[in-house]
Image (cartoon, helix red, strand yellow):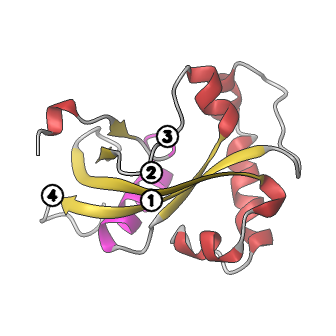
């Protein structure tokens, strides 16, 4: 597997949240993720495709795992289901709890700056990309938690 030619998968921004998400991926607890469809559009990036592999990086941008996309759905925010929420592996036990946390992240100054819209907000009809993936390979077998 030629890691140099795989795209990097960066979950959240470097710091405690990314470290938590990477730990969940490495443990196998996290097998889904959700992103704003607008984020892909603003970055000029295509949506993920089934079968695509990427290298997960930690907060220090070190490669720690390879994941493979197994499902991609674009849905309205209000249509994100409990199975997806639970498989995000972040400890949320309800869609409402998950949504509150994600809205706080998406309304953060960092996300708004990344989107180029200081007033950005989500609502029920906001399109999100619900991606399911599988852990293909741990690249840092000595790292159980960050």
**Residue 140 relative to residue 125: left or right:** left
Location of mark 4 (residue): 140
Which callout, 3 or 4, points at the residue further toward the start of the chain? 3
Nearer-N-terminus badge (4/2) = 2
Q: What crowding class fits label 1: few (fewer than 14 Cα within 10 Å), some (14-19), or many (20 or more)? A: many
Q: Residues within 10 Å of mark 4 (few under 14, many from 20)?
A: few
Q: Which residue is mark 3?
A: 13
Which residue is found at the position 76% from the left and 51% from the top? 103
**Distance Cα–Cα, label 3 vs label 4:** 20 Å
The residue under label 1 is: 21
Q: Secondary structure at mark 1?
A: helix
Marked residue nearer the N-terminal end (2 or 3): 3
In the image, residue 122 above or below residue 80: above
- Frontmost residue, 137 versus 27: 137
Is the C-beta separation of discs 2 and 1 under 8 Å?
yes
Magenta stretch contains residue 89: no
- The disc, 3 or 1, on the residue closer to the chain's N-terminal end is 3
Marks 4 and 1, the one that precedes in the sequence: 1
Magenta range: 12-27
Q: CA distance from mark 4 to mark 1?
A: 15 Å
From the top left corner, tell me how far across and down residue 101 is, in percent: 70, 59
Residue at the spot 83% in from the left edge and 43% down from the top edge: 122
Instruction: Return the mark for residue 103.
Output: none
Distance between the alpha carbons at the discs numbered 2 and 3: 6 Å
Residue beneath disc 2: 18
Picture quadrant where residue 26 is located: bottom left
């Amino acid at each position: 597997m030629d890691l140099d030619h795989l795209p990097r998968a960066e979950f959240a921004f470097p710091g405690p949240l990314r470290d938590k998400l990477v730990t969940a991926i490495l443990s196998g607890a996290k097998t889904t993720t959700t992103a704003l469809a607008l984020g892909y559009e603003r970055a000029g990036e295509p949506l993920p495709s089934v079968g695509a592999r990427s290298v997960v990086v930690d907060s220090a941008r070190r490669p720690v795992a390879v994941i493979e996309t197994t499902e991609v759905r674009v849905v309205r925010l209000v249509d994100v289901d409990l199975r997806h929420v639970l498989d995000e592996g972040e400890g949320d036990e309800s869609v409402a709890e998950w949504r509150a946390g994600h809205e706080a992240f998406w309304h953060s100054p960092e996300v708004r700056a990344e989107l180029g819209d200081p007033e950005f907000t989500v609502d029920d009809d906001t399109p999100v990309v619900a991606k399911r993936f599988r852990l293909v390979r741990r690249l840092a077998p000595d790292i159980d938690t960050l």
